[in-house]
């Protein structure tokens, strides 16, 4: 899977209340799910027997394979699927991490809601260790087999359990593995088209479905198991929409092979952009491939062909229509093509945001400040830019909502839907804002993040402070903005009056005071209350009290 840094971070659980689960990720039909809001999912949009995969990780930085790990998986499994009653919240302990609770509740509610579709559910338990896998003891194997055999006997219908150990050798292999963005596209016919300018060229071709399936996938193991090469789809503005009516129609067409009707007659086809293209015989060697239109078709082709035998794949003689454009990395042309080729079907403004002129403007401005705005997923990571200097659209939107809306609770509770709807997107990314509104909001958050990481490294024996470093970055960000301006009412007009040098060199005293005010607001609790709406008001009260005290001292 092609995870962004944000995708990875969203699934990490850095808490002593995680019940042994250090990371958790959920996939529906191979698509990573970040929105754990049950109302967002419609039963009708899923076909019978769709895939639901859960990956759970325990990560151990030890030189031995610890025998206690399977036991922790067993304890967590009870809470994940030990009871399938309608009241899914009652069995979860109060001491459990809130993000983990949200994940468990969603998983169980989703299973209940989709029961009529009989989903194929697989739970993967991954034990990741610095130790060599060969060091696994007989006791570990016996205990592990006994635990997982027992779990399999007491799970819900159509649920499979998988358990593996990822040791040092496997970690090195994974670290060295790269997913190519280049490939050889074999076609069966083509039409010559004129070059528009010297730096651009185009081709209209048809390719056998079986060859296109191989082009968009890559082998992942010795058994030649294939997975979709998501690196090729980074620039596509749409996520795969699972089993929508459109995709159901595509897959139905693919399943009904006919000697009289070819697939490309019934489908709008694929649009591919590449930096370079060389054609030898009937094979096109393409570099830096981006499939900018045809994600739904591509996923449907992959899903169908990946479930066929090799003989069935080779026997298929149908073709798909493909438009190939060689652009020599002309970025503005890329965005124009992406926007135009996706305008035939309804697409919201937020889906097109990566090519929104404002997003390009923000990216260009931040680059002058040595900050890399990842408006296109993984673009700068692939260019090997420093991870600490790469920020996402979501990261910036959280900072804006925390500071300008004075609502860090909303920003942290619902990060993936802050700009999902058109109205929300236009509110957060207001085209009337001075560009420095975005820059200063982002810079304040980055300074807070750096400060909290330094606190965490000191391993202070203060559970409340530790709680703040894990869950309250946005609350400290909102507080710091007010202290920088000595007002609770931070807005688009006054935030740009701050001198840039004051934000790049924030006095440690102000950072300390910001943390202290958040600490006062959350009280003496060690629980994660960063998503409780009342916390916004409590922080506002603490800021106002602080400002009054400072004024009286003067």
Image (spheres, helix red, strand yellow):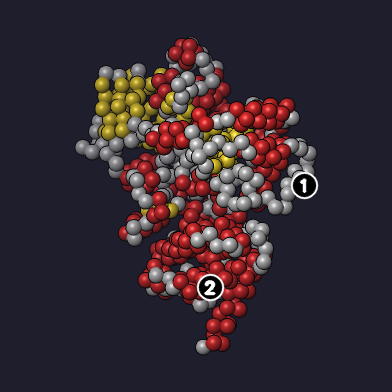
- The residue under the point 46% across, 24% down is 221
On the image, numbered disc 2 is attached to which residue?
513
- The residue under the point 63% across, 38% down is 68
Q: Quadrant of residue 336?
A: top left
Describe residue 303's horizontal placement relative to residue 319 as left or right: right
Counting residues from the start of the chain, the first of labels 2 and 1 encountered is 1
Describe residue 107's horizontal placement relative to residue 248 as left or right: right
Query: What is the spatial separation of the Cα atoms under label 2 and label 1, in whole angstroms?
Result: 39 Å
Q: Quadrant of residue 169?
A: top left
Of 538 and 307, the residue lying toward us = 538
**Neighbour tally class for label 2: few under 14, some 14-19, many 20 plus, Cα within 10 Å:** some
Picture coordinates of residue 420 (x, y %)? 54, 50
Residue 71 is labelled as none
Secondary structure state at the residue bearing disc 1: loop
Residue 201 drawn above or below residue 96? above
Picture coordinates of residue 540 (x, y %)? 60, 72
Whether residue 318 can be seen here: yes
Residue 239 drawn above or below residue 544? above
Picture coordinates of residue 484 (x, y %)? 47, 74
Q: Quadrant of residue 159?
A: top right
Picture coordinates of residue 357 (x, y %)? 39, 53
């Amino acid at each position: 899977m092609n995870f962004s840094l944000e995708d990875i971070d969203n699934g990490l659980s850095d808490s002593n209340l995680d019940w042994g689960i250090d990371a958790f990720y959920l996939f529906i039909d191979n698509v990573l799910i970040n929105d754990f809001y049950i109302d967002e999912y419609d039963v009708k949009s899923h076909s019978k027997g769709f895939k639901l995969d859960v990956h759970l990780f325990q990560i151990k930085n030890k030189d031995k394979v610890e025998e206690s790990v399977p036991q922790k998986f067993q304890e967590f499994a009870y809470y994940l699927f030990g009871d399938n009653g309608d009241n899914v919240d009652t069995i979860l302990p109060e001491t459990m991490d809130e993000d983990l609770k949200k994940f468990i509740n969603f998983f169980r509610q989703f299973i209940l809601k989709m029961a009529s579709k009989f989903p194929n559910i697989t739970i993967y338990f991954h034990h990741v260790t610095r130790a060599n896998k060969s060091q696994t003891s007989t006791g570990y194997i016996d205990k592990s087999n006994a635990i997982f055999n027992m779990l399999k006997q007491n799970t819900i219908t159509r649920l499979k359990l998988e358990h593996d150990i990822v040791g040092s050798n496997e970690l090195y292999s994974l670290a060295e593995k790269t997913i190519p963005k280049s490939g050889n596209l074999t076609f069966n016919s083509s039409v010559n088209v004129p070059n528009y300018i010297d730096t651009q060229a185009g081709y209209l071709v048809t390719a056998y479905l079986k060859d296109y399936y191989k082009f968009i996938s890559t082998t992942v193991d010795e058994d030649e198991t294939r997975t979709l090469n998501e690196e090729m789809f980074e620039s596509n503005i749409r996520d795969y929409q699972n089993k929508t009516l459109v995709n159901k129609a595509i897959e139905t067409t693919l399943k009904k092979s006919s000697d009289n009707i070819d697939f490309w007659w019934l489908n709008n086809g694929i649009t591919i952009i590449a930096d370079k293209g060389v054609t030898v015989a009937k094979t096109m060697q393409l570099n830096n491939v981006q499939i900018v239109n045809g994600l739904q078709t591509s996923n449907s082709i992959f899903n169908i062909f990946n479930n066929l035998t090799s003989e069935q794949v080779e026997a298929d003689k149908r073709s798909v229509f493909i438009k190939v454009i060689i652009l020599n990395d002309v970025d503005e042309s890329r965005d124009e093509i992406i926007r135009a080729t996706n305008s035939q079907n309804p697409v919201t403004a937020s889906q097109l945001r990566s090519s929104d002129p404002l997003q390009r403007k923000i990216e260009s401005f931040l680059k002058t400040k040595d900050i890399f705005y990842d408006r296109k997923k993984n673009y700068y990571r692939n260019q090997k830019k420093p991870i600490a200097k790469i920020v996402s659209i979501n990261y910036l939107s959280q900072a804006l909502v925390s500071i300008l809306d004075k609502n860090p609770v909303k920003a942290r509770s619902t990060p993936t839907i802050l700009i999902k709807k058109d109205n929300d997107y236009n509110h957060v990314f207001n085209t009337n804002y001075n560009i420095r509104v975005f820059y200063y909001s982002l810079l304040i958050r980055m300074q807070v993040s750096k400060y909290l990481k330094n606190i965490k490294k000191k391993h202070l024996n203060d559970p409340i402070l530790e709680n703040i470093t894990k869950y309250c970055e946005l609350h400290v960000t909102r507080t710091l903005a007010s202290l920088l301006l000595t007002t609770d009412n931070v807005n688009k007009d006054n935030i740009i009056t701050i001198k840039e040098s004051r934000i790049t060199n924030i006095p440690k005293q102000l950072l300390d005071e910001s943390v202290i005010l958040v600490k006062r607001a959350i009280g003496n609790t060690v629980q994660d209350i960063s998503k409780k709406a009342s916390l916004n008001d409590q922080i506002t009260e603490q800021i106002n009290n602080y400002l009054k005290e400072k004024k009286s001292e003067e």
